[in-house]
Image (tube, rainbow, N blue to C red):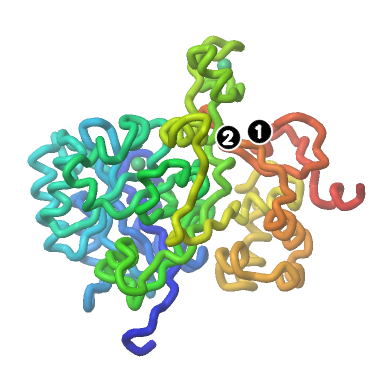
Amino acid sequence: MSFGDLVEFDCDLHIHSKYARATSPAMDFPALAVGAKQKGIDVIGTGDIIHGKWLENAKNLLEAEGGRFSFKEIDFILQTEIEDSNRVHHVVFLPDFSSVDSLREMVSKRCKDIDADGRPKVRAASVEIAEMVLDANGLIGPAHVFTPYFSVYSKFDSIKDCYKEYFDKVHFIELGLSADTFIADYIPELSRFTFLTNSDCHSPFPSRLGREFNRIEMREPTFCELEKALKRKGDNRVTLNVGLDERLGKYHESACNSCYAHYSFVEASSLKWQCSKCKKRIKKGVLDRAIEVGGGAKAVSKSPSHRPPYLHIATLTEIIALSRGVSDQASKKVKEIWQTIVSGFGDEITVLVDAEPEKIAEIDPLVAKVIRLFRQGKIVIVPGGGGKYGYLKFDTDKAPARGMNDGSGEQKSLFEFEKK
Ligand SMILES: [Zn+2]
Ligand SMILES: [Zn+2]
């Protein structure tokens, strides 16, 4: 690679370390490097970089050279997530360790204990967080903007109300697992933003790390080059957003928090968001919230010309489980098949995104068929809602929504599907 050539990097820019709440104890740099290689991710956000112990780990392990931070051939962008006093989450990128140190110092003054959680809870408004990040020469944008908890649109009707005078200095938003470009482009104020699709993962395994990622064209995997891509300066660009089909997200449709009955926006509103079956609360889904913020029933989704394509995927373990008619994606059998396919192609992203089904069929014809059907939109996706993930099934299933994760054993295998 000579200087000046644009290169495509697959980047997952928001994760968490083992020092954040409810994360896997396996979440350290060596495991991330292994997971990234298996998945096919080139660049990872470090997560939690202003946490004392994680920062110490990063300073000891990451090789720093010319703005790059790498460990075992995987590049890292110094990154954290911060929760503000409105309980809104922000994704933050920082150029170097001195910026990290200075943000850590500013944040610790507004935090009971900055090392209590990898994702610090800060007693400061969004505006103040933005000011601190910009003072530290970092970049800030709202995380998983549509989730019904901890997101900008769960607290505000517009991003401008959140960042106020710093609104113009925010260049990206993170879509989150239950949303895609089509949904976000219902909202006119989002049209100038670069969209990011990140996993926000809590464990380093390939079913989690990189389950959403961005393909970014830049010259090197550095903060400076990333900044240009996010601001769409020069020819640096995010060229592809890749994410779980948004219907698989656990807050996609409006649904009861307790019995998971699904409701349309109109039904839920007329019930005052109380479930008619069990009287518990109906949680407003991401799609309904986007339409509501975007102007209600008359809203239309309109993408600006700079918007890259959005590719929907499912994780390979879920596809394998479906191909074999098993409900447990973590079973030994699924893992063995996963290992065989991934060793054949080098990594999971190549299988999910780039490989021809004919090539996959040489290794595993059943998985190749599911991938082909999935790409053709012929796999039924039962939408998630109320905190329960959506799932995949074949469209020959006449029985109503029974989860492939619920152990009901009703899922048809591809073999049965073919025989029909
Ligand atoms: Zn978050
Ligand atoms: Zn209910």
Residue at 50% across / 31% down in the picture?
288
For residue 261, what is the image quadrant? Answer: top right
For residue 23, what is the image quadrant? Answer: top left
- Residue underneath mark 1: 406
* Closer to viewer: mark 1 or mark 2: 2
Instruction: Name the quarter showing ligand 1.
Output: top left
Residue at 47% across / 42% down in the picture?
186
- Position of residue 111 relative to residue 173, above or below, is above
Amino acid of disc 1: Asp
- Residue underneath mark 2: 384
Image location of residue 204, percent across then percent down: 44, 55
Q: Residues within 10 Å of mark 2 (few under 14, many from 20)?
A: many
Residue placed furthest toward the front: 298
The residue tagged with tag 2: helix, strand or loop?
Answer: loop
CA distance for labels 1 and 2:
14 Å
| Observer able to see residue 69 | no
Image location of residue 342, percent across then percent down: 61, 67
- Give the mark, 1 or 2, whose residue is nearer the N terminus: 2
Amino acid of disc 2: Gly
Residue at 75% across / 65% down in the picture?
364
